[in-house]
Amino acid sequence: MGLNKKQKKQLEAARNKLNKLRQVLAAAKQQADDPDEIPNIEQEIAKLEQEIRDLKAS
């Protein structure tokens, strides 16, 4: 079954946030001021990727 309008909107928002987080991660790796920042960003990315998978599966 296809995604409804709300799910498509959620998926689009999650993808946009994921792209922004990946850019932030790349910048954080270049300038590692806070050693805890990179693992936190990677955790958020993993959480968003899981959310995207769940939305696609529903």
Image (cartoon, helix red, strand yellow):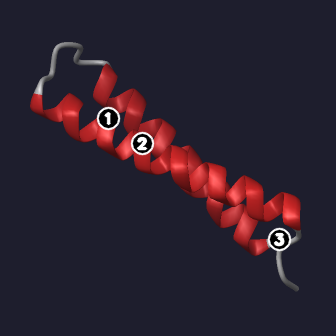
Q: Amino acid at mark 2?
A: Lys
**Residue identifier under label 2:** 20
Type of residue at label 1?
A: Val
Considering the numbered disc 3 on the image, is that residue within a helix, a strand or a loop?
loop
Residue at 22% across, 41% down: 26
Residue 2: horizontal and vertical position, in percent? 84, 82
Q: How many marks?
A: 3
Where is residue 20? Give x, y as percent.
Answer: 42, 42
Q: Secondary structure at mark 2?
A: helix
Per the model, the C-alpha gap separating discs 1 and 3 is 29 Å
The nearer-to-camera label among 2 and 3 is 2
In this view, 55 is above or below 38: below
Is there a contact, CB below 8 Å, between mark 2 and mark 1? yes
* Mark sitting on residue 58: 3
Give the mark nearest the N terminus, 1 or 3: 1
In the displayed structure image, the side of residue 13 where residue 2 appears, left or right: right
Q: Earlier in the sequence, mark 2 or mark 3?
A: 2
